Amino acid sequence: MIRKGMKLYSILFGACPKCHQESMYINKNPYALSDVIKMHKECSHCHTKYEIEPSFFYGSMYVSYAVAVAFAVAAFIITFVILELSLTAAFVAIIVTLIGFMPIIMRLSRNIWINIFMSYNEDLVEKSVTKEKHA
């Protein structure tokens, strides 16, 4: 089971990598294409800045390539190996898969990239809960 405190939780749900209390993205829907990579500047709970340095997320392009290859291989295996369709059908399935999952691939790669450099910190969660109780 995936729960808060696990790196996989932050990667799959786009939660703050430090406290897992808030989505990093302004719009949670990845298919709102005008907002697909628009992010909050920082977490409103733990005040973690998401862009560690200028152009930080350019590195996620490398991760995006790997994630896209994984999606393409999965599409190929499903169409060519499991369904035993032609190579042309497998090629079309790969193209459709990559276009259809493009917003998810973009967000997943950003989530993986930031989680390489940041880890969950339970102390930040406790501090934010304590501040909310005293407010």
Image (cartoon, grey):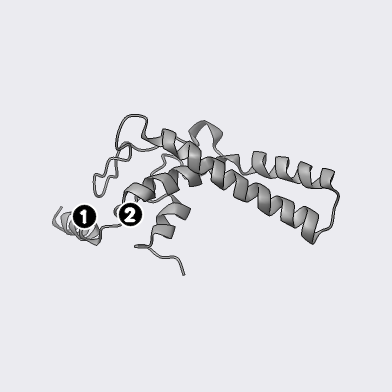
Q: Is residue 117 above or below residue 57?
A: below
68 sits to left or right of 6:
right
Q: Residue furthest bottom?
A: 1
Where does label 1 land, which residue? 128
- Categorize mark 2 by other alpha carbons within 10 Å: few (<14), some (14-19), many (20+): some
Residue beneath the point at 55% across and 45% down: 66
Position in image of residue 45 (x %, y %)? 26, 49
Question: Could you tell me the amino acid type at mark 1?
Answer: Ser
- Categorize mark 1 by other alpha carbons within 10 Å: few (<14), some (14-19), many (20+): some
Where does label 2 land, which residue? 21
Residue beneath the point at 47% across and 54% down: 12
Q: Is residue 2 above or below residue 68?
A: below
Position in image of residue 22 (x %, y %)? 35, 50
Secondary structure of the residue carrying tag 1 is: helix
Question: Could you tell me the amino acid type at mark 2?
Answer: Gln
Q: Give 17 or 132, whichever is nearer the viewer.
A: 17
Could you tell me if residue 104 is visible in this image? no
Residue beneath the point at 43% across and 33% down: 58
Alpha-carbon span between mark 2 and mark 1: 9 Å
Residue 126 placement: quadrant: bottom left
Q: Is residue 113 above or below residue 38?
A: below
Position in image of residue 53 (x %, y %)? 30, 33
Position in image of residue 94 (x %, y %)? 72, 44
Q: Check if mark 2's residue and mark 1's residue have beta carbons within 8 Å.
A: yes
Mark closer to the chain start, 2 or 1 = 2
Q: Is residue 65 above or below residue 84?
A: above
Secondary structure of the residue carrying tag 2 is: loop
Residue beneath the point at 66% across and 38% down: 99
11 sits to left or right of 52:
right
